[in-house]
Amino acid sequence: MNAKPLLFLSLLTLPCIADAMTLAQAEAALREKNPDILAARIELRGAQGDLFDAARRPPAELSMGSSKISRQQGIGAGPWKDKRVDSTLGLGWTWERGGKRHLRVDGAQARGEAARLDLLDQQREQVFALHEAYFGLKAAQQSLQMADDNRAGSARALAAAERQLATGAIAPIERNRLAVEDMKAEAEARQARQELLDAQTGLALLIGSTQPPEQLQADDPWPQSGVAAELPQDFDPALRADLQAAAARVHAADAERRLARSQRHRDVQLGVEMEREPTDIGGVTWGFSVSVPLAGPDHYRGQILRAEADYDAAVLEQQRSGQLARAQLRQAGGQLEAAGTRLRHYEQRIAPAARQALDGMELAYRRGAASLTDLLDARRTWREAEQERVQALLEHAVALARWQALVALPSPQGT
């Protein structure tokens, strides 16, 4: 067979080349394409549009009409000025009382500020989710690498056992045990490969990537374990975006409450009218009108009660958000300290001890001083220690990202 078709088929069977991505690149893609951040930007645009509506004054009303059109006599002969028709042209205005326009604008501005802060808070939350997904992918990459190395080592050990069995150097039971371990290693490698694909898919969805998820690869190193959970000197929890947004919603609810109360100040309708009636008074006559709604003192009671309830709910939500923020800080600080301690314990004690035990057991097995069972147990213990060390790295990276997200404060004009 020609070598060119074989080369072409071999290229088709190669896996996709992974695209190494730094955490900074992932954050840039997140801010540009993350669906939740895009939705928050759209909500901000809508709130800005509400401000224009709130600032608009009631428009003037133009009215035109004709009356006294007789079915028997008609409208009369001659030009329009000689017709027997009473024609009117009116212009009306609404005089808003009680500062309604100012209160509408105040509430809309507060809601717009809350939407802007919600966007900043959404960015903060999504950056934390990105760190969690990014380092989850890195952990999956390392787990797959360990699984593939274990699979390759198991295959080599099984091949060597086949040769030794043929020469009678080992018993069939030892070869069978190695075959079982090889099948377990193969299953673990398949599971690790699926977990890697899941992690790649999760990261791709988070950053809005359109390329195949299989091409994503986390390239940044693990965070250092010596970071302490200490608050910055100028840190004020009330300046966090979510708490500022809660305060802005209280302001907006207060404006809505005052707007509902202002309904008690009745708006006045003012009008001026121009009338021409040829059969009564020659020429054009003028008139004016004033109208006031005759509403009782309890007419707006329902709106006021609803606005009062919304205000109380906003205040309660603000208090709850503050309590939750303080609890989250305490919890995240403890988790970061615990994760750092656990990581150092694995890196400095457990993992090196497991590696030394495995090296010693392999040497003893080669010299005939240890059984195959002892060797397999040592290998299993080392793999478990390595997997737990990777898990400790992931837990520390996530705990650090959560702490940094909770103490992050928005820039004054940031969006």
Image (spheres, grey):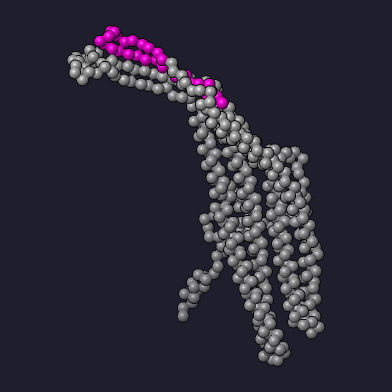
Which stretch did the figure color magenta?
261-289
Residue positioned 55% across, 32% down in the render = 108
Left or right of 179 on screen, residue 339:
right
Residue positioned 23% across, 14% down in the render = 84
Q: Residue furthest bottom?
A: 168
Residue positioned 70% across, 55% down in the render = 397
Residue 37 seen anywhere in this rendered image of the structure: yes
Question: Does the magenta portion include 4?
Answer: no
Residue 155: percent from left, percent from top: 65, 79
Q: Nearer the viewer, residue 66 or 334?
A: 66
Residue 169: percent from left, percent from top: 72, 90
Q: Quadrant of the C terminus?
A: top right
Residue 410 seen anywhere in this rendered image of the structure: no
User: How many marks on residues?
Assistant: 0
Question: Does the magenta portion include 262?
Answer: yes
Q: Residue furthest top?
A: 282
The part of the image, by quadrant, that contains residue 165 is: bottom right
Left or right of 337 on screen, residue 58:
left
The part of the image, by quadrant, that contains residue 368 is: bottom right
Residue 206: percent from left, percent from top: 58, 53
198 vs 298: above or below: below
Residue positioned 57% across, 46% down in the render = 37
Residue 196: percent from left, percent from top: 61, 64
